[in-house]
Image (cartoon, grey):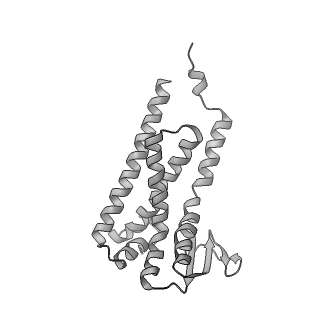
Amino acid sequence: MSTRHQTVPTILDVLRHAAVVGFLCPLPILWHEIAGHGVVGVLCGGKVTRFQLFGLQFVPDFRWTGTRGGLGICDHSGIRSQWCAHLTDIAGSMSTFVVAAVAAYVLWKCRPRGLKFTALICLAVWCTDLLTFTLPSFGVRRYIWSGTRYSEPYKAAVALGIPGALFQALVLVGAFAVFLLAGISIWRRIESARRA
């Protein structure tokens, strides 16, 4: 007897997956600012002087500021050294990239299914934060047609002594590896569903 009818997703399944995507898609901005800039800046002796997300400022006071300065901002004062300041700058995009790389590896190695698969695909896409934030170092705006012309991770990497061309190459190779592992995982999932 065929079990094909069991693989057809229900509306509830689709809503669950959509909820996971809806939750994880805006999360890299929060992660970039808190786990990246925020935590590293504090560990480097700094104090958060301004923190805002999606136009809402939380520090020093709670108010609407708009998104003109960006979707997320985490400023510090009192960071111990210039080296620590550059480390804090690069930590934002590197923190999302680390999450993406781990997610892509888990996807490839463990072959999860269901909501875990959807969540890990979303996390793997977080590598676009570092990739797009490096684009201005190639003379392209962050989102090609719009966005900043300033590459925070590239400037910080160069200030930390990493040759610019090497950093650009590492970002491109790293993003390619993450997308390759995620793509292989998606292909395996499609093939598995086709055989079911």
Where residue 22 sits: x, y (%)? 62, 52
Horizontal side of 159 relative to 128 (left or right) equals left
Vertical position of residue 176 compared to residue 91: above or below: above
The residue at the point 34 percent across, 59 percent down is 172
The residue at the point 28 percent across, 69 percent down is 165
Determine the residue located farthest toward the top in the rendered image: 1
Where residue 156 sits: x, y (%)? 40, 76
Q: Quadrant of residue 51?
A: bottom right
Where residue 118 sits: x, y (%)? 55, 44
Report the number of discs: 0
Tell which of 104 and 175 is nearer to you. Answer: 104
The residue at the point 61 percent across, 43 percent down is 17
Determine the residue located farthest toward the right in the rendered image: 62
Tell which of 14 and 147 is nearer to you. Answer: 14
Q: Quadrant of the N terminus?
A: top right
Where residue 124 sits: x, y (%)? 48, 52
The residue at the point 38 percent across, 56 percent down is 175
